[in-house]
Image (cartoon, coloured by chain):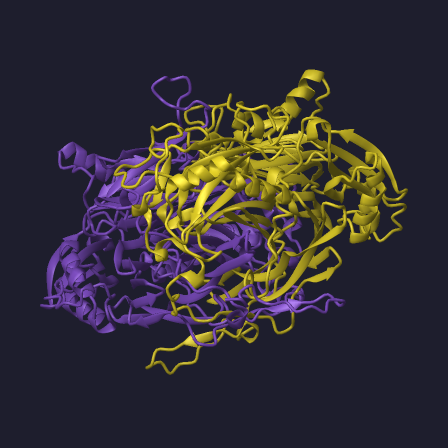
Chain colours: A yellow, B purple
Amino acid sequence: MHPFDPLTPEEISRASGIVRPHFGGQDPNFRVVTLQEPPKNHMIQFLEKEHRKQPTGPAPTRCARVEVVVKGYNRNNELFELLVDLDHDKVVKKQHQKGKHSYIDAAYMKSVEAACLANEEVQAEIRGLDLPPGSTVVVEPWAYATDGMNDMTQRVTMCWFYLRLIENEDANYYAYPLDVCAEVSEQLEVTKVYRLPTSPDERIHNKPRPFDRRRIHPTALSEYHPDLRPNPRTTTKPYQVVQPEGPSFRIQGQHVNWEKWSFRVGFNYREGLTLHDIRYDGRSLFYRLSLAEMFVPYGDPRAPYPRKAAFDLGNDGAGINANNLQLGCDCLGTIKYFDGWHNTASGEPMKLPNVICCHEQDDGILWKHTNFRTQNAVVTRARILVLQTIITVSNYEYIFAFHFSQDASINFEVRATGILSTVPLEFGLKEKVPYGTIVAPGVLAPYHQHLFSLRIDPAIDGQTNSVVVEESKAMPVGDQSVHNPFGVGYVTENRIVEQEGGFDLDFTKNRVFKFVNENNINPITNTPVGFKLLPAYSQMLLSHPNSYHAKRSEYCTHAVWVTSYEDNDHFPSGQYTMQSSGGDGIASSINKRNAAGTAQSVRNSDIVVWHTFGATHNPRIEDWPVMPNERMSVGLKPVNFFSGNPGLDVAVSTQENNKSVLVKDEDDKTDNVCCHSRL
Amino acid sequence: MHPFDPLTPEEISRASGIVRPHFGGQDPNFRVVTLQEPPKNHMIQFLEKEHRKQPTGPAPTRCARVEVVVKGYNRNNELFELLVDLDHDKVVKKQHQKGKHSYIDAAYMKSVEAACLANEEVQAEIRGLDLPPGSTVVVEPWAYATDGMNDMTQRVTMCWFYLRLIENEDANYYAYPLDVCAEVSEQLEVTKVYRLPTSPDERIHNKPRPFDRRRIHPTALSEYHPDLRPNPRTTTKPYQVVQPEGPSFRIQGQHVNWEKWSFRVGFNYREGLTLHDIRYDGRSLFYRLSLAEMFVPYGDPRAPYPRKAAFDLGNDGAGINANNLQLGCDCLGTIKYFDGWHNTASGEPMKLPNVICCHEQDDGILWKHTNFRTQNAVVTRARILVLQTIITVSNYEYIFAFHFSQDASINFEVRATGILSTVPLEFGLKEKVPYGTIVAPGVLAPYHQHLFSLRIDPAIDGQTNSVVVEESKAMPVGDQSVHNPFGVGYVTENRIVEQEGGFDLDFTKNRVFKFVNENNINPITNTPVGFKLLPAYSQMLLSHPNSYHAKRSEYCTHAVWVTSYEDNDHFPSGQYTMQSSGGDGIASSINKRNAAGTAQSVRNSDIVVWHTFGATHNPRIEDWPVMPNERMSVGLKPVNFFSGNPGLDVAVSTQENNKSVLVKDEDDKTDNVCCHSRL
């Protein structure tokens, strides 16, 4: 077992067993039993020895982090966080997280749904809608995004109503949002029922209003499930990836070796896929990479819609919501799947099958040169290794993939797909709604943002790194001290980040953020070895700085954050985002350290870089009824780290290996041969 | 024959034959014999009828545009441009382009090389270098980038010197730039020989200085050709694309039909691949798409380096320099190649084989949704159609590819690869050069920019289009007239472009450029049907506005240009870029129309949009000795054009079609089945 390996089923059972007796006979609801990752200062030494194939000495103490909920005073839920030493089978820390909430409890959400539908007042509203026969009301419970209107010590659930118009459980009920809304308390009481606004300037109210049957439209426009659709197009011919000698990767447990890359695959209920101890050709690059948070605030200003703002990692969990990936569906070629493990409410291990897939892809040309004097062409094809996980968060899907390349770069790709979250609108409106797009009769898809935080823990030839901000700048003209006679000269200017903080992108200056090791100067270029961030240029949070959205998310105001490394500091909007009231995020942490005088220089030290990126998603009708993927990509690329192109030794592309097929014109009798027949 | 089809070999011969007698017995040097594309006003009617399968009436007159060079007074080259009516076999226009130059003449460049090497003074300089035995001097002639130091009515060629250290014609001589420089006149006279600066502050001089043999380094660090390198890595296992039922495309002549897409493939010596009459599901999207220009100015301020600035289309030609693509090398799967035709100096047709390839690629997941209530997942895979061309311009390669997607979007991808242009530097410098990167001992790779212009001629449901600039903007807080009680609301604001001009990107405002048809309102969204540009965020030209680089390129100062459509207006730095002195580009054209009072509103009219993008390429040592591809991508995507997801009818992904292979753990006995076994 490696210290980075997720908890085994046996460890999960054992940790629960150790925790269980600590609640005075009450059977706690186990929300989380996960690996408490080992302290970095111990791990650095461990990894150094491991890679030198020396005895590693004792591994760090194996530790579980446990969250349980127990019933307290007034049947309130009380959250406790515990640390369990699995080497000595004991609880080493137990903390009452007063007023905090664990992530969304799917079983509890089902109770909310049931309680809501069973409520008299709700039933009266539904009767008032006079719904078409054969249709079914579906309640979609959402975690409450703090808006300052409720006491947040208890959970409140917002229930949105939809209509499943036809009798098929896979029918797309988001095509028929209903103008009913209910609020449900922690104790499963329906505390408020009202009608939603259905025009741009309307407010919530309680006037009964029947369902407008003019909204009913052909299923071909609103259904995505093939059982409910006309026959699909038949023009797309099969396309198969064949790897006759098997994959180029070697996987042992959680450790992956591929084309000079070496790293370990981690997994937890919250971040889902994590990557550890990433090296290329034996040299350390990153200690850890993970998606750290994701915030989806909606831009519809009308109450109660400001309560729609999801922390898809902190509240929902990218691990617990990861899809069970299936052969022939989510990737092509030769595929290795990784399972994850989580826990049941009673603390037993629960398998999450096939939550990560690992496979290779061809990625076009890696490099090519044709010597124009000899006409000899040399081409290599690019192979990438893909580590992919896909999550479903109610209506939406996110496809997250790390791509490793033979040129020693890494790309993190996000694809957003799935179904838009919709709200009701009066039928027949003939204007555009300023904060949403009408995607079907009586259906508004409100504007919203998806803001991701990619956490990058660099270890560029070691843990002591700096962040350099480089800009490309025209040399002055007419300045006698500068030789730029033709006005064409330009230079790069570097500024090293000295203090923790948030920074912005500026492509007009070709501003580049680099992670460098100032202690290791490349002997050819005379510059520190480094990697650079290829950012995704994105609009930051549109919510007002005084809004709860802004106070709770914090990381969404700057594209690049630099902080000092701290063990277990993985979450830029804080550990407990569920109905949080703000002040727990990355900006507050920095401010607190500055105020306390404990802030340390981030130059030449152990640092973490957080990249905020995403999309201001103003829906198109083309995103309906299911979104073609919307792609975002972030890159990490060596800059004067190696002594040359790391993919220079990739073998040239040959027809012998690739076995491509020529489409010949009928009158063409020539042979096409590979450019490397000579080689 | 279709009016958009390039000239046939027979037409090329015939056009030359018609032109030849027009030069008083002198045998002209035929530089260009290419299609003069038909007038749009005629073509629109023609295409309308063609797509309705009605008789099209007479096709537009078939016309050739011809450039010839003849010897004039003082053996000067005189350029003539002619138009030939091929329906009536006559010259309809003949124009002396006084003081202008056609694109680079490869045969002439070879004479320049020979003349340079034969020169006494050059030979004396070479002797003074005291070069290692067995090495060969290579002269690389470059077109002269105007810097105001010479009379530009005659061609001047800059000769850069390199050393081929070993006796192999494919050795990478860019690894040994020599500090010698020569200038060669139109009449093949060496007019100037001097030594280049070799330190950041040195100037050109004539002091002899022997080649510093400490620069000699292992070939493993400087060679890319497999014959000259250690054995390649053997870990990359074969990866094949199999299409058992053949490709999904149907190609007839230059016409391509694929997955509801229809378009025509064009080709000319300058732009290379062009696309015409692009439609999806029968609806018109774009009249024409092409890469229109590319400018590569270098940022080294020291004379004579300001003369390094290449118009890779205008001076070199993306068509004439297109690679002969080979099966098994440049793509995988089932591949259709298109040939191009150009002309010899004597006006005969010259085949350019396999200059364009067309094939399909799998592109990951197109869309997915898992119903969390039923756990039923529906996944479709994305197939794309790739039209690719690769050009070699001396040291560099560019891979240009249009990707057509099933969701009705188009991506234009550029990959830069090949070898950096290098200059000599003194051995052992221990500092960074501010405007370049040292990539090998005594070898500086100067900073430079690659700025592309993608010309987009939209035809969104017809030719009458407008450009809308949309921004996403927070709603005000505390303004009583605006309902935004929680400070989270945001809206889009639209501004329609009324006048021709250049515009800038701003991701901080989520600024989006759309091409819309204001006459066609989407009945569901209540907004004009449109497409949007997904730009590549890039730093614009760093050269000073008064520099020749800026005056000659013009399009490089703004990311988006909007102009009124004019026939044959294809080049944003002007028709004749070779040693141009400026004033012929897109900005000057707009200014001239404004000054003359002939500027027309670009709203609701026939418009062209030009996107400037690229890279400020400050080389990394990882780009050496051959660059792993540097990727840039521009997208065109429908926005409220259709009535829903255009890829909604793509069939779901199945293991039956995809035949993926499972990597099983040794202890795993379960079967993995496709997610669609139920369907």
Image location of residue A143, percent across then percent down: 56, 36
Image quadrant in which the C terminus of chain A is located: bottom right
Most foreground residue, A178 or B67: A178
| Whether residue B301 is visible | no
Residue nearest the viewer, comparing A453 with B400: A453
Left or right: where B27 falls relative to B158: left
- Residue B184 lies left or right of residue A292; in this view the side is left
Q: Position of residue A295 (x, y in %)?
A: 54, 36
Quarter of image, res B55:
bottom left
Find residue B263 and report its horizontal and vertical position in percent. 29, 62
Q: Quadrant of residue A559?
A: top right
Residue occupying the point 67% across, 19% down: A594
- Residue at 42% x, 20% y: name it: B477
In this rendered view, identify the residue nearer to me: A191 or A536.
A191
Q: Is residue A38 visible?
A: yes
Relative to B190, is A194 above or below?
above
Q: Position of residue B255 (x, y in %)?
A: 29, 67
